[in-house]
Image (cartoon, rainbow, N blue to C red):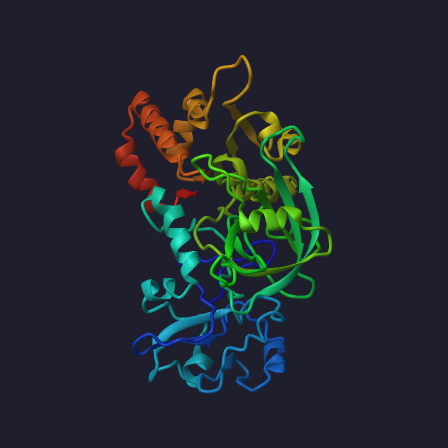
């Protein structure tokens, strides 16, 4: 049975099944089998028409893929209008799902070993994700009402080409941080993303050892219907890296590449990636967002999604705690100031304002302790933390102090938040 759908047709999964797409490799006796999701397939015949080796066929019920013929050329991927073609399962090499199995399905079978499936993502993605999510206690599940994400449609060995259609500085000209709003257009290639997902960018050239540069990950800053609705595009928030975390001079290969691009440039893109840092979709759900710097990208995507749907009056509260050195160093400061107060409650924390005490996001969280503890206890409120790794400890301590102040126990509450998929951290 097909699950309920959001307004744009994305199936809402109550039990999340992560999709994994890459060229087939065999680990021991395990291989990936390319499959079509019958729940969201609209039987348009596009995949069968596009397959150059006749690996796809159908009956009156389902479209299916012949395991022994499919070579994962991915020619069927882009044209699929729903993403139904973008699925796989890990199977024993001698025991794939048969055509008879596939013809009988109403939905895809659950992965037999999600842990194996997770390792099939590109190594860099797995490594970075583990670091980013360590602050939430490891991998988590997405909110129960999150839309179904499509993951790893384009691998590093076969990226999609996007065209840069916008490159705008979004920090003040006198600010030390050069942060850009980058817009990428995918033309006729299907590249579905959700708020909270990331994409990989492959910078051109080679490293000091003569090897091609590896992929870098960037969070998507636009909502699921694009930076400009009706166009097949998305946006990123990119800071030009000129020093490392210790303040030593360095030049970020990919960030400087992106920040220097001019309109019309071609960019190699992988992904999308990310299956848990997703916003809730059910009516009345509230979101608490805590971020610094370019960690604002997924928060902008979620906020813009809500802004575009304000007339539907379906969303709960939006709370934003946003930290930066000063107003001119804060990306999207101008647009944020124009957002309707009935949409979002914004709390800025500036740490380098002359003649003013230093404030960090945890200080603002403590100031709003009554609202914060209320939202922590609300089962329809979801918490998202994104930005520099150093912010985790301060935020955690602020939550602990607030809970103590209101007779709650943070050490007991946090596991509950995790079990309910309400606490999501991505820090770097």
Residue at (52% x, 22% y) in the render: 352
In the visual, does 316 lie left or right of 362? right
Q: In the figure, 206 relative to 399: above or below?
A: below
The percent position of residue 358, horizontal first and vertical second, equals 47, 19
Q: Quadrant of residue 186?
A: bottom right
In the rendered image, the quadrant that contains the C terminus is top left
In the visual, does 329 lie left or right of 393? right
In the visual, does 377 lie left or right of 307? left
The percent position of residue 225, horizontal first and vertical second, equals 63, 53
Considering every residue shown, the one lying at the far right of the view is 264
The answer to whether residue 220 is seen in the rendering is no
Q: Choose between 56 and 158: the one closer to the eye.
A: 158
The percent position of residue 192, horizontal first and vertical second, equals 58, 59
Residue at (42% x, 26% y) in the render: 362
Q: In the figure, 138 relative to 350: above or below?
A: below
The percent position of residue 40, horizontal first and vertical second, equals 54, 67
Q: Total of numbered circles in the picture?
A: 0
Q: Quadrant of residue 13?
A: bottom left
Residue at (36% x, 29% y) in the render: 399
The answer to whether residue 112 is seen in the rendering is yes
Q: In the figure, 150 relative to 319: above or below?
A: below
């Amino acid at each position: 049975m097909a699950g309920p759908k959001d307004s744009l047709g994305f199936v809402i999964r109550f039990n999340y099944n992560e999709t994994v797409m890459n060229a087939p490799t065999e680990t021991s006796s395990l291989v990936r089998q390319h499959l079509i999701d019958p729940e969201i397939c609209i039987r348009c015949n596009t995949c069968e028409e596009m397959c150059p080796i006749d690996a796809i066929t159908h009956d009156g019920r389902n479209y299916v893929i012949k395991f022994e013929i499919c070579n994962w050329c991915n020619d069927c991927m882009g044209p699929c209008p729903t993403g139904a073609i973008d699925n796989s399962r890990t199977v024993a090499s001698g025991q794939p799902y048969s055509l008879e199995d596939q013809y009988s399905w109403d939905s895809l079978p659950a992965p037999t070993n999600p842990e194996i499936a997770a390792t099939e993502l590109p190594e860099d993605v797995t490594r970075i994700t583990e670091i980013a999510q360590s602050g939430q206690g490891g991998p988590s599940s997405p909110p129960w009402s999150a839309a179904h994400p499509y993951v790893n449609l384009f691998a590093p060995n076969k990226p999609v080409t996007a065209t840069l259609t916008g490159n705008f500085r979004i920090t003040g000209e006198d600010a030390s941080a050069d942060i850009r709003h980058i817009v990428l257009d995918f033309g006729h290639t299907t590249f579905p993303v959700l708020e909270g997902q990331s994409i990989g960018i492959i910078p051109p050239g080679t490293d000091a050892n003569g090897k091609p540069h590896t992929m870098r990950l960037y969070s998507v800053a636009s909502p699921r219907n694009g930076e400009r609705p009706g166009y097949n595009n998305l946006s990123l928030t990119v800071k030009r890296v000129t020093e490392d975390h210790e303040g030593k001079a360095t030049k970020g290969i990919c960030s400087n590449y992106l920040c220097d691009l001019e309109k019309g440039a071609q960019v190699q893109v992988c992904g999308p990636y990310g299956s848990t840092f997703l916003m809730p979709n059910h009516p009345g759900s509230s979101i608490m967002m805590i971020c610094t710097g370019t960690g604002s990208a997924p928060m902008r995507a979620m906020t813009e999604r809500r802004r575009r749907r304000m007339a539907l009056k379906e969303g709960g509260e939006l709370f934003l705690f946003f930290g930066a050195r000063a107003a001119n160093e804060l990306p999207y400061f101008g647009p944020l100031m124009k957002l309707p107060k009935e949409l979002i409650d914004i709390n800025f924390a500036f740490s380098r304002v002359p003649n003013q005490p230093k404030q960090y996001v945890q200080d603002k969280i403590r100031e709003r302790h009554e609202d914060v503890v209320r939202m922590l206890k609300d089962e329809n409120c979801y918490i998202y933390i994104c930005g520099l790794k150093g912010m985790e400890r301060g935020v955690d301590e602020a939550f602990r102090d607030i809970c103590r102040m209101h007779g709650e126990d943070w050490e007991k509450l946090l596991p509950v938040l995790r079990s309910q998929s309400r606490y999501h951290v991505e820090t770097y």
